[in-house]
Amino acid sequence: MPRGGEDGPHPVDRHVGRRVCEKRIGLGYNQSDLGRALGLTFQQIQKYEKGANRISASKLWDIARFFKVDIGYFFEGLALQPGVGEGDAPAFDHDFPATRYTIEISRLAPALPARKQKLVLEMVREMAGVQGGED
């Protein structure tokens, strides 16, 4: 399995970092807030969130306690596709940076009636240049 380096961060490190970022933004903290709580700089938090630096088990434990989540939260959504294992990396449905906007959209969308959710989805698909899937 790739460990990073020339090929970039390991997919699991990126996934865990992304989950840290999503939770941090969702709770309204900035990188400096989280850094202060953990005794780190915001630059270190940035590296964690990008997956550039791996988060040690003890630091992930501290992050989970600060966010008041189970440590398993950071691994949710991480699954291997069938047949993966002989040197292949885990597969992800998406691998994009979380932003305040994507998190707010995902938080507000369920409050819309199904008809409006479908309209918003169609608009976003059109803006992204993506063909519609099965509805």
Image (cartoon, rainbow, N blue to C red):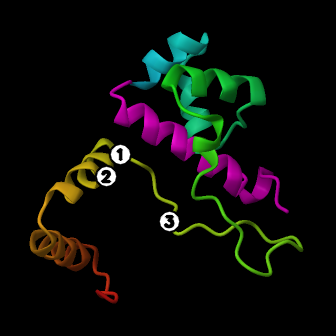
Mark 3 highlights which residue?
A: 94
In the picture shown, does residue 111 fall above or below 45? below
Q: Which residues are magenta?
A: 1-29
Q: Is residue 99 left or right of residue 126?
A: right
Q: Quadrant of residue 57?
A: top right
Q: Are marks 3 and 1 in contact (CB under 8 Å)?
A: no
Alpha carbon separation for disc pair 3 and 2: 13 Å
Q: Where does the image place residue 38, in percent across and percent down from the top left?
A: 59, 14
**Can you identify the residue that label 1 sits on?**
99
* Callout 2 secondary element: helix
Q: Kindly report the distance in space between the C-alpha atoms of the residues bearing marks 1 and 2.
A: 5 Å
The one nearer the camera, 52 or 58, is 58
Q: Which mark is residue 102?
A: 2
x 56%, y 38%: residue: 49
**Percent x, y of residue 40:** 60, 15
Q: Is residue 9 above or below residue 48?
A: below
Answer with mark 3 or mark 1, whichever residue precedes in sequence: 3
The reply to whether residue 44 is visible in this rendering is no
**Which sits in the foreground, 118 or 8?**
118
Instruction: Pinpoint residue 104: horizontal percent, then vertical percent.
Output: 25, 46
- Magenta span has 115? no
- Whichever of labels 3 and 2 marks the residue nearer the N terminus, that label is 3
Q: Residue at x 10, y 70 (%)?
A: 116
Q: Left or right: where does residue 31 sit relative to residue 38?
A: left
Asked whether residue 132 is in view, the answer is: yes
- Quadrant occupied by the C terminus: bottom left
Is 23 colored magenta in this rendering? yes
